[in-house]
Image: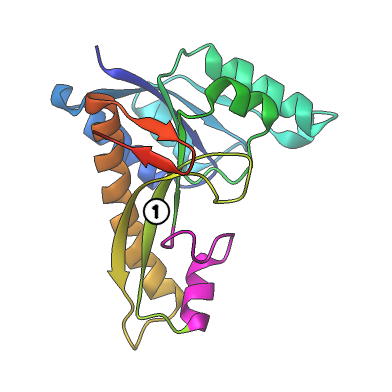
Amino acid sequence: MPARVVVLVSGAGSNLQALIDASSDPAYGAHVVAVGADRDAIPALDRAAKADLPSFVLRVEDFEQRTDWDEALTATVAAHEPDLVVLAGFMKLVGTSFLERFGGRTINTHPALLPSFPGMHAVRDALAYGVTVTGCTVFVVDAGVDSGAILAQAAVPVDAADDEATLHERIKGAERELLIDTVGRMARDGWSVDGRKARIP
């Protein structure tokens, strides 16, 4: 039985599409069962519809309290009975309710080699610092910002001619490959999280 994956998105959905494509192969071990978003009318929802996947939208501004949104997100995701939740360009921090239910099985990507350059401007920050190598990280989501246990990383060289856009584009390609590989390995082989250490056998 393939691992059930719920993907949460906020934008174009290129990582979502890569997961949908990968899960069409029975040998991959994981299958996207639903897509959730924090905003309407985004390309990622069109991708879900094209793949005949159920989708839902929960906007933070439609709830009185952020905790109400988090509880609604938790309940809606739980209804799809996921083994794994993937934040694929999801531009909201999940809260206590969500982590109590899905902690240890929610993963995210980041366009830098964590713990270096956390936050929203990782590519810009890496360029400004002058590094010659940066990359991407797949990590287990916790209550902090880009602070969870690291599952996998890939390095991306910084070219002398790079600006933020060109570097980010190369990182996104590496990030997509790393995410697909990591989700497949987790689905097929399992994983463990022990404090700061996350491992796939």
> Is residue 93 found left or right of 138 in the rendered image?
right
> Is residue 43 found left or right of 187 in the rendered image?
right
Above/below status of 168 relative to 77: below
Helix, strand or loop status at disc 1: strand
In the rendered picture of this protein, how many numbered marks are placed on residues? 1
Location of the N terminus by quadrant is top left
> Is residue 76 found left or right of 87 in the rendered image?
right
Residue 72 image point, x, y percent: 68, 20
| Residue 131 showing in the rendered view | yes
Residue 170 image point, x, y percent: 32, 66
76 is within the stretch colored magenta: no
User: Residue at (46%, 12%) from the top-left corner?
Assistant: 81
Which region of the structure is painted magenta? 111-129
Residue 182 image point, x, y percent: 29, 40
Q: Which of 83 and 16 lies nearest the eye of the viewer?
A: 83
122 is within the stretch colored magenta: yes
Residue 30 image point, x, y percent: 28, 24
User: Residue at (54%, 28%) from the top-left corner?
Assistant: 103
**Please, which colouring scheme is shown?**
rainbow
> Is residue 11 found left or right of 95 in the rendered image?
left
Location of the C terminus by quadrant is top left
Above/below status of 136 relative to 61: below
User: Residue at (16%, 21%) from the top-left corner?
Assistant: 26
Residue corresponding to mark 1: 137
| Residue 87 showing in the rendered view | no
Q: Which of 158 and 11 lies nearest the eye of the viewer?
A: 158
Q: Residue furthest bottom?
A: 160
Question: Mark 1: few, some, or many residues within 10 Å (few <14, many ≥20)?
Answer: many
- Under mark 1, the amino acid is Thr
Residue 6 image-quadrant placement: top left
User: Residue at (58%, 20%) from the top-left corner?
Assistant: 101
